[in-house]
Image: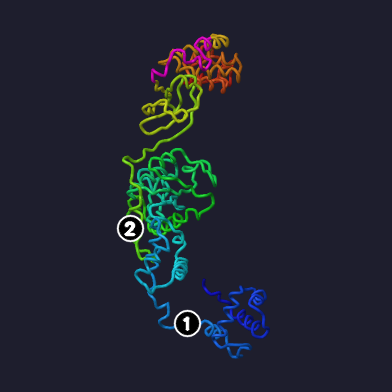
Amino acid sequence: MPTERLSMRKTREVLRLRFACGLSKRQIAAAVGISATGAGDDVARARRAGLSWPLPAELSDEELERRLFPPPAAGRPEARPEPDWAAIHLELRRADVTLALLWDEYRGRAPDGFSYSWFCEHYRQWSGRLAPRMRQTHLAGEKLFTDYAGRTVEVVDGATGEIRRAQVFVAALGASSYTYAEASWTQGLADWVGAHVRCFASLGGVPRQLVSDNLKAAVTRPCRYEPGLNPTFQELAEHYAVAILPARVRKPRDKAKVEVAVQVVQRWILARLRNRRFFSLAELNGAIATLLAELNNKIMRHLGASRRELFEQVDQPALQPLPAQPYEYAQWRRCRVGLDYHVEIDGHFYSVPFRLLREVLEARSTAATVELFHRGKRVAAHLRDQGRGRHSTVPEHMPSAHLAYAGWTHERMRAQADATGPATAALVEAIMRSRKHPEQGFRSCVGILRLAKSYGAARLEAACARALDIGARSYTSLASILKSGLDRQPRPSQAADPASDQPTADHPNIRGPRYYH
């Protein structure tokens, strides 16, 4: 253990209590507020220096300290070969490498070298002088830290002159501090996931752990112990066999490595681009890539090596291999199966087996496909169709008795429509006839019949009559007629001058009919 070195004021008091008052080490320790070992050491040093009490009046604190703690003579341990602390610091980042192993190797090269306790103490003193980003020890290939920079970059649309602000994604490897950066339009899920895919491709491998910020694209439920991950981000992790460890909320030290990397990127890259004008995201990313290469090739003062050199020596050999295919971005969402055994995704309707009526499914959508899962099992797959309001139906999903499971049949729907009125029955029948499969009209028909609860049967019947007159065949059109009160106005065939845009005599505040489609 290092010697407990007291202030000279306390040292003088220790010597007075010992030599003038005759107190023991423990009594001196209690009186001065130091350890008994420290008190005994000061008394022993004073005796070796030939000092007693009272001390000479001309003895200053500096002279007293020099006599109690003389500088080492030539040929003492300090003249022994000193270890290369930077090399030792880097070696500690390799898996299973310890200070004991490195000291043993040091003594093998220098048999007269320092002791193990001296070795450990002086390494800690050396590492304590490093920049904050170097104080944590990260194993090779273990962690990649990711976040977005606080600053954005302007990009001008050359055609319109519109200015958009691009976000800057930053990633840093733990052991080598090797840095990756790119610009994207948003911090949304698609850009967040895509940035990770391109980062892994740039590294040529995958770390074992991914430490991310708590932005919404990554974490849906922040929690110190069990954070809820976005399903797409979780799927990315499974594809690349990497563990996601979100940083705790308001705990920047959990991702100190990328916090420093963000600062370096902002000062080394973004600050240098402050006077440049960019007209596309590709142009901006080209400029970032050029400066990023310079940053990674720059020698780090404390370690005497560049990020790229450390990456090639330490991190790169320890990374996991990339999968055969990069991850394809997919969105996950929950959806409920309607009475027509279809689910709606981005305005298009996709069929599922009839037995899943009213069940909640999970939909996985990519640019090319839509997959539907029930309790983790895939129950349907479709090619992606961008046609809004249209249906993609698999015949095998359509058994004749499917609606019995939901309590609705053609007969029940017609009976309820007849009970409301002939116009309602006619509109329901027209909607079912307009569909390729009558069941595809059930969703609209059920919605129309339920409007009677909000507006009453009489108003619903009047609205259905107006809808038939103007050719409207949807729930949305009927709801609009009721909401605007057009069901209470004369129908086009009854208006005094339906083609006129002027008020009629009987209804001076009502203009010509409006048509809903």
Percent x, y of residue 424: 53, 12
Q: Nearer the viewer, residue 366 or 281?
A: 366
Q: Amino acid at mark 2?
A: Gln
Q: Which residue is mark 2?
A: 313
Report, in whole angstroms, how far the alpha carbon at label 1 lies from the one at label 2: 41 Å
Q: Which residue is mark 1?
A: 71
Q: Can you see residue 287?
A: no
Disc 2 element:
helix
Relative placement, left or right, of 250 versus 75 is right
Disc 1 element:
loop
Earlier along the polypeptide chain: callout 1 or callout 2?
A: 1
Percent x, y of residue 61: 57, 84
Residue 110, quarter of picture: bottom left
Residue located at (34% from left, 70% from top): 109
Disc 2 crowd rating (10 Å Cα; few below 14, some 14-19, many 20+) is some
Q: Please tell me whether residue 411 belongs to the stretch shown in magenta.
A: yes
What span is colored magenta in the figure? 394-414
Percent x, y of residue 83: 38, 70
Q: Which mark is residue 31?
A: none
Q: Please tell me whether residue 252 belongs to the stretch shown in magenta.
A: no
Q: Is residue 461 above or below residue 350?
A: above
Q: Amino acid at mark 1?
A: Pro
Q: Is residue 389 above or below residue 404?
A: below
Q: Nearer the viewer, residue 498 or 62?
A: 62
Q: Can you see residue 6?
A: yes
